[in-house]
């Protein structure tokens, strides 16, 4: 069964640095998402992406965040200048049209 | 705005006992509800979708619009059911965004 893959599984970065989290969605899926989960808290929606543009974003997704689908297979989340509070598990997901969303294994981001 | 509430953070039962994980939602439109499960160190996986009306791994969930609930039930819990369970709501429109509850950690003891 095809899966959403995310790399790296764990990223450690210093405050103020830029990070790029990478995702390869399932190949025939059209909708792409990023969610995050701060330790001990719920899974929160960040952004959805369809037809090469953002279709919805949450309040969390401020100017320091950006997403890109650079080459038709990868879907990236960039955090421009990381803060301590960006430490979380970041999940990528994809879907064909409506649910189910298929999630990746996540990238644990630690900002020190 | 939509909201999903899972009132129990932790739920512990013995093997063979019935289990019910509660989920209530708040949404002005016609919701689509899901249960996702996350086993230790694994990805979020779809367990149930209310429109499918399936039973997966012995779990069922019925959407009760009057009570705005979508509780997950299993008559006889197994140790391998131990996991984090998330109730989620999909709002309408063309976006297919999921709103998750905080999750319930189910532990099934031998």
Image (cartoon, coloured by chain):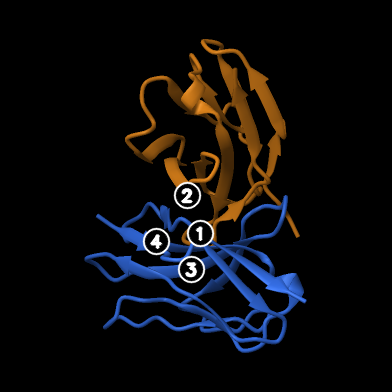
Chain colours: A orange, B blue
User: Separation of disc 1 and disc 3 at Cα?
Assistant: 12 Å
Indicate the secondary structure of the residue bearing disc 1: loop
The alpha-carbon separation of the residues under discs 1 and 4 comes to 16 Å
Q: CA distance from mark 3 to mark 4?
A: 8 Å
Chain hosting mark 1: B
Whether A67 is drawn above or below A51: the answer is: above
Q: Earlier in the sequence, mark 1 or mark 3?
A: 3
Q: Residue furthest left?
A: B28
Q: Residues within 10 Å of mark 1 (few under 14, many from 20)?
A: many
Q: Chain of mark 2?
A: A
Residue A50 visible in this rendered orientation of the protein: no
Q: Which residue is the site of mark 3?
A: B34
Which dot marks residue A21? none
Q: Circle 4 marks a residue in which chain?
A: B
Q: Are marks 3 and 4 on the same chain?
A: yes
Q: Which residue is label 4 attached to?
A: B90
Q: Is residue A27 visible?
A: yes
What separation in Å lies between label 3 and label 2 (alpha carbons)?
15 Å
A72 relative to B62 in the view: left or right:
right
Residue B84 position within the rendered picture, expressed as x and y whole percent measured from the top left: 60, 60
Residue that appears at 67% across and 47% down: A4
Question: In the image, residue A112 lies at what x, y percent?
Answer: 59, 17
**Dot 3 falls on which chain?**
B
What residue is pinned by disc 1?
A: B103
SS for dot 3: strand
Q: Are marks 1 and 3 on the same chain?
A: yes
Foreground disc of the pair 1, 4: 1
Near mark 2 (Cα within 10 A), the count class, few <14, some 14-19 or many ≥20, is some
User: Which residue was labeled with disc 2?
Assistant: A42
Q: Are marks 1 and 2 in contact (CB under 8 Å)?
A: yes
Q: Are marks 3 and 4 in contact (CB under 8 Å)?
A: yes
């Amino acid at each position: 069964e095809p899966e959403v893959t995310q790399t790296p599984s764990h990223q450690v970065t210093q405050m103020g640095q830029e990070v790029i989290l990478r995702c390869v969605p399932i190949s025939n899926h059209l909708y792409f998402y990023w969610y995050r989960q701060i330790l001990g808290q719920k899974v929160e929606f960040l952004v959805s992406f369809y037809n090469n543009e953002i279709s919805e974003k949450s309040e969390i997704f401020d100017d320091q965040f950006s997403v890109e689908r650079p080459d038709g297979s990868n879907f990236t989340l960039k955090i421009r200048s990381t803060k301590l509070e960006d430490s979380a598990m970041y999940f990528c997901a994809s879907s064909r049209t409506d649910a189910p969303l298929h999630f990746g294994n996540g990238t644990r981001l630690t900002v020190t | 705005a939509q909201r999903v509430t899972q009132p129990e953070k932790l739920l512990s039962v013995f093997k063979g006992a019935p289990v019910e994980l509660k989920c209530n939602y708040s949404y002005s439109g016609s919701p689509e509800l899901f249960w996702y499960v996350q086993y230790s160190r694994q990805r979020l996986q779809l367990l149930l979708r209310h429109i499918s009306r399936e039973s997966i791994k012995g779990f069922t969930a019925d959407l009760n619009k009057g009570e705005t609930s979508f509780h997950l039930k299993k008559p006889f819990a197994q140790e391998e059911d131990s996991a984090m369970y998330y109730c989620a709501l999909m709002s309408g429109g063309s976006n297919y965004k999921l709103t998750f509850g905080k999750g319930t950690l189910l532990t099934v003891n031998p």
